[in-house]
Amino acid sequence: MHLTDLTATESFKSLQQHYADARTWQMRDLFSQDSQRFEHFSIETAGLLFDYSKNRVSQETMRMLVELARERGVEQLRDAMFAGEKINATENRSVLHTALRAPRTATLRVDGQDVTGDVHAVLDRIHTFTDQIRSGQWEGYSGRPITDIVNIGIGGSYLGPKMACQALRSFSHPRLSMHFVSNVDGHDLDALLQTVNPETTLFIIASKTFTTMETMMNAQSARSWFLKHASQAGLPRHFVAVSTNTEAVKAFGIDPNNMFPFWDWVGGRYSVWSAIGLPVALAIGCDQFRQFLDGAHAMDQHFRTAPLEKNMPILLAMLGVWYRNFFNAASVSIAPYHQDLAYFPGYLQQLEMESNGKGVAANGVRLDMPGCPVIWGDTGTNGQHAYFQMIHQGLDLIPVDFITALKPTHYLPGHHAALLANCFAQSEALMRGKTPEEVRRELQGSGMSAEQTEELVPHKTFPGNRPSNTIMMDQLNPSSLGALIALYEHKVLVQGAVWGVNSFDQWGVELGKVLAKTIQNEITDSVQPDRHDSSTNALIARAKAALQ
Ligand SMILES: O=P(O)(O)OC[C@H]1O[C@H](O)[C@H](O)[C@@H](O)[C@@H]1O
C-alpha cells in the first residue's frame, strides 16, 4: 500500500525538474537530432509493434519515468496480482483475470482452490456447447438450428463481448448473428425482439452478480416474449446463463447445466476472458477463442518478465502519467484505424475510467493530484472529419493512441493503403505541425496578397509537438486482439500503482443505483415524491403523471 503522496516521491520531484526543460523541446528537433529515433523508441512483442517515438521524451525521460514506476511499487503489485494475492483490498478479493488465459499446465491455487483446473473445466464445457450450437446439433424447440444469439448483460458483461465480436467479425460463423442488449430502456430490447425468431434465438443472460437491475428486467421481458411463442419446456434450449451466482440463476429458472460459471476474482471489466466471453467463443469457435486467450497470455508473460525499460505496458502507462501529471493533459483520445475496433474506445472507457477514476488512494487518503484522464475516441478516418480539429489546433494537449493493422481481412483494392496513409499522416501532422513561415511561403506561392496572407497565417498554423503512440499489428485476429486488450489491462494496473489507487473496485457506481430504486417506487407506486429537492420532485411528478 502506497502511503506516500505521488508528489512527495523522489523520482516525481526529479521528473518535475526535468519537465521544466522537457516542456520546451520540439519533437521535430528530437527527430532531426537522432536519425534512429524510431529504433530507439519502439518495441515489439506478442504480435504488436509499439512506436512511441512521437512523444515529448528523451531516453533520460523514459529512464526517469521507469524509475517512478519502480518507486511506486509497480513490480510488487504486478507480482502480487499474478500470485493471486488479495490486491483488491476494499472487496478482499484476488484479481486473477490473467489466470483465465494461462495454459492448462500452469499451477495456481487460491484459498486452497485449484484455479487453473477450474478455469479449464469451464473452458472445456464452453468448447462442447459452442461446437453444438455452431454445428447445428443444438436445436431450438421446433427442431431448427440457432441463428441468432442475444447477449443480455451490461457493463463488463456487455462491453467486452460486444467489442470482441465486432473486432473478430471476419472470423465469425456465417449462420450466427450476434446481438447485444444492455440498456433498461425498453427501446433497446423491443427493437431487437421485432427482428428475431423465437424458434432460432438463443439468449445468454450474462451477469456476474445476477442482480443487476437492467439485466434482470431485460431477462424477464425476453423470457415473457419467448413464452408467448413457445412452451415452458422449450426454455432450456433457448436460455443459458453466465454468472458467479448459481442460486440466483436457479431462482430465475435456468438449469445449472445451462450455466457457465466464473469467480469473484474476475472483475466485470476484466471478464471477457471468462465465460462472459461466450458470445465471442460462439462467434469464432472455441479453438479461435483459445488463440484469443493465448494472445493475452503472451502479453502477460512479457509484462511479467521483460525489463521495465523494454516493457510495453509499463512504457504505455508511464507515457500516460507523463502527460497527465506533468503536462496536465485531462484526456486521451483512442483512434483505432480499423472499423472492426469501433467499440474499442468505449471498452477502454470502462476499463480505464471505472478502474482508475478514483479520488482517494488505496489507504483512503485523498489523492494529491488527479489520476485517470478522460478516455474517448472513435475510428479513423471518421474522427479526422469531426473532432481532430481540436486535437491539432485547440489549446488543450490531447495525446492520441493510433491503433491499426497492416493487413486487412477484406479484398477491396486501394482502401487499406488509404486508411494506413491517413493514420500515419495524422501522427506526422500532430508531431510536425506547420510553422507560420511554412504557411506564409505556401500562401504567397499561390499568389495571395501579403495582406490576405498575414490575416490567414494564424488560422493555418499548426503548433505541432502533439504526442501520439502508434500500436500496429500485422492483422487484427484473435491472437493480436487478445494481446492488445491485455496491454491496456496492464497499463491500468501500472497507472493505478503510480497513482496509488485500488484499480479493482468501483464503489462510485453505487449511489445512483440506490437512489434510482427509491425513485422508481415513487414513479410507479402511490408514494408521494416529497423527500427530494424541488427539481427532482418536479421531474418525478411529471413522470408519474405520464406513466400511471
Ligand atoms: O455483471 P454484473 O454483475 O451484471 O455487473 C455489470 C456491471 O455493473 C456494475 O454496476 C459495475 O459498475 C460494472 O463493473 C459491472 O460490469
Image (tube, helix red, strand yellow):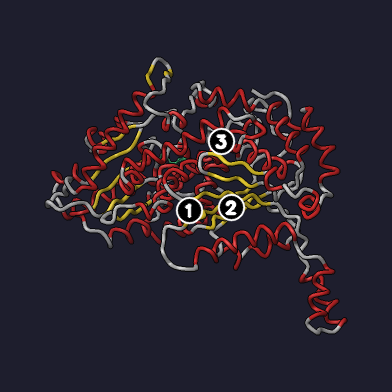
Image-based side of 33 in relation to 110, left or right: right
For mark 1, does the 10 Å Cα neighbourhood hold few (<14), some (14 to 19), or many (20 or more) residues? many
Q: Residue furthest front?
A: 35
How far apart, in angstroms, are the residues tagged by discs 3 and 2? 17 Å
Q: Secondary structure at mark 1?
A: loop
Q: Secondary structure at mark 2?
A: strand
Q: Earlier in the sequence, mark 2 or mark 1?
A: 2
**Residue type pointed to by label 3:** His
Instruction: Tell me if label 3 and label 1 are in contact, CB under 8 Å.
Output: no
Q: Which residue is mark 3?
A: 490
The answer to whether residue 548 is seen in the rendering is no
Quadrant of the frame with the N terminus: top right
**Residue type pointed to by label 2:** Ile
Res. 343 mark: 1
Q: Nearer the viewer, residue 224 or 522?
A: 224
Q: Which residue is mark 2?
A: 334
Image-based side of 326 in relation to 136, left or right: right
Query: Where is 392 relative to 38, above or below?
Result: below
Query: Where is 228 relative to 69, above or below?
Result: below
Q: Nearer the viewer, residue 411 or 500?
A: 411
Question: Residue at the location (50% across, 57% down)?
Answer: 338
The answer to whether residue 41 is seen in the rendering is yes
Residue 42 on image: x %, y %: 64, 44
For mark 2, does the 10 Å Cα neighbourhood hold few (<14), some (14 to 19), or many (20 or more) residues? many
Q: Quadrant of residue 354?
A: top right
**Residue type pointed to by label 1:** Tyr
Quadrant of the frame with the C terminus: bottom left
Q: Residue furthest right?
A: 450
Residue 495 on image: x %, y %: 63, 36
Query: Where is 321 relative to 31, above or below?
Result: above
Residue 50 on image: x %, y %: 60, 45
Ligand 1 located in image quadrant: top left
